[in-house]
């Protein structure tokens, strides 16, 4: 059942990508797209369990835009932060690598979390091992796991929990 | 719409420039990745969206390119960071903590 | 006017990345500089499509960004020893 759900989500994502790339609804394009879509899905879906974790509940209509908004805000903050650090002649950095714990289980949610952390102010994901993420932090504020987790990932994790498992 | 597109293009090229400046100035590869990824992602995003605003025929394609850059750029920088950490590129002397290395020494990971 | 200014800024960005590409103490600095150059080139291709009003440059930019990503990931994985 879960496998079928992932397969259908994979098909929908691939079909949307094809439509955005070609940009037409003409019959020939749709035919070629449909054939290659089914072929790729049947041949390669078995290698990936990425899409199985996506939740489908009424709540996601609210939480996807919310996540996007939080993400964009953090991205702009990150850029202003990095720009200020780069411009200052003294180069104010205080770097280090810290570990944080996450409660997320599925690969997709960890991927989204790691990408979001990379694009937020002063943090860069170096490695992911099970439920531990190693983060390079340009301005270390807390060396132990709890304070680093609170400072870096909690704002994303609260929303991500509602979208993916 | 034209003014908006111009502003977006200007902001984008400014951030591309700042990202390269960061790559040039920062002391070690991890800090360079920090500056490089964030600034170039945002810079390219803003510039390409600006082009989409200026010529609305390109808008759909520019959104596809922006989506792709936002999805892939953090992955490639994470891969570089992981590879350099695994092959033992040291952090800059100023660094305060390296949890990963401590764990390796104790044999926990 | 705006376009001239942004071309000057992007030119400076290419210059700084190239300096890092040639100087870079480790091989990872060089990959990083190459990755940055790929993104900058994508932005330049999109700007060219605006200048010449040809949508084909957008497709070129899309393919370029895909190939740049794949190349960087492959080289990084190879250096890590996981390939």
Image: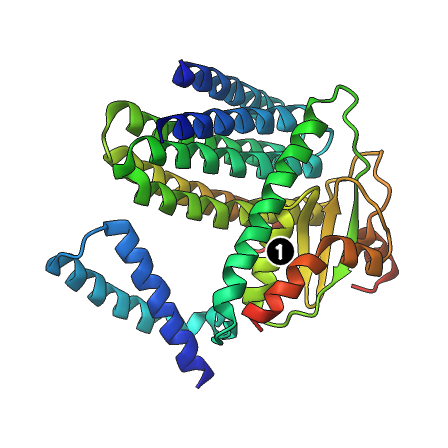
Q: Is residue C45 visible?
A: yes
Frontmost residue, C12 versus B7 = B7
Residue A102 position within the rendered picture, expressed as x and y whole percent measured from the top left? 71, 65
Q: Toward the viewer: C17 or C45?
A: C45
Label 1 element class: helix
Query: On the rendered structure, is A41 left or right of A82?
Result: left
Quarter of image, res B94: top right
* B82 relative position to B6: left or right: right
Tell me if residue A113 comes above or below residue B86 in the rendering.
below
Q: Which residue is mark 1?
A: A114
Q: Position of residue B6 (x, y in %)?
A: 41, 25
| Residue name at image x 50 percent, y 18 percent | C9
- Quadrant where the N terminus of chain B is found in the figure: top left
Question: Residue pushed farthest left?
Answer: A27
Disc 1 packing (10 Å; few <14; some 14–19; many ≥20)? many
**Viewer-proximal residue, B102 or A56?**
A56
Q: Please identify the quarter of the rendering in which residue C67 is found.
A: top left
For the point 61% across and 48% down, which residue is it?
B78
Q: Is residue A50 above or below residue A143?
A: below
Closer to the camera, C33 or C45? C45
Is residue A16 found left or right of A148 in the rendered image? left
The image shows residue A140 at horizontal and vertical percentages of 82, 44
């Amino acid at each position: 059942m879960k496998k079928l759900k992932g397969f259908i989500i994979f098909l929908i994502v691939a079909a949307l990508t094809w439509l955005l790339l070609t940009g037409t609804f003409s019959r020939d394009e749709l035919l070629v797209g449909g054939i290659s879509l089914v072929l790729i899905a049947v041949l390669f879906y078995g290698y990936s369990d990425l899409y199985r974790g996506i939740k489908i509940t009424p709540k996601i209509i609210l939480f996807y835009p919310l996540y996007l908004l939080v993400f964009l805000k953090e991205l702009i903050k990150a850029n202003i932060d990095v720009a200020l650090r780069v411009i200052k002649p003294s180069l104010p950095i205080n770097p280090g690598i810290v570990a944080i714990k996450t409660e997320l289980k599925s690969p997709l949610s960890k991927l989204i979390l790691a990408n979001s952390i990379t694009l937020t102010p002063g943090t860069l994901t170096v490695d992911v091992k099970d439920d531990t993420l190693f983060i390079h932090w340009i301005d270390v504020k807390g060396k132990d796991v709890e304070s680093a987790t609170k400072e870096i990932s909690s704002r994303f994790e609260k929303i991500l929990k509602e979208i993916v498992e | 719409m034209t003014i908006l597109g111009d502003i977006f293009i200007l902001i984008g090229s400014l951030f591309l420039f700042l990202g390269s400046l960061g790559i040039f100035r920062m002391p070690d590869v991890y800090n360079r990745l920090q500056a490089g990824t964030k600034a170039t992602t945002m810079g390219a995003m803003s510039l390409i969206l600006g082009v989409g605003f200026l010529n609305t025929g390109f808008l759909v394609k520019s959104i596809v390119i922006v989506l792709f850059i936002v999805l892939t750029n953090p992955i490639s920088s994470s891969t570089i960071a992981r590879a350099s950490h695994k092959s033992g590129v040291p952090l800059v002397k100023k660094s305060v903590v390296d949890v990963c290395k401590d764990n390796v020494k104790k044999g926990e990971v | 006017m705006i376009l001239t200014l942004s071309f000057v800024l992007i030119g400076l960005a290419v210059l700084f990345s190239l300096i890092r590409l040639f100087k870079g103490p480790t091989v990872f600095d060089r990959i990083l500089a190459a990755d940055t150059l790929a993104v900058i080139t994508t932005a330049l291709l999109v700007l060219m499509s605006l200048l010449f009003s040809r949508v084909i440059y957008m497709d070129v930019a899309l393919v370029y960004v895909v190939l740049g990503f794949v190349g960087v990931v492959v080289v990084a994985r190879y250096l890590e020893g996981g390939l």
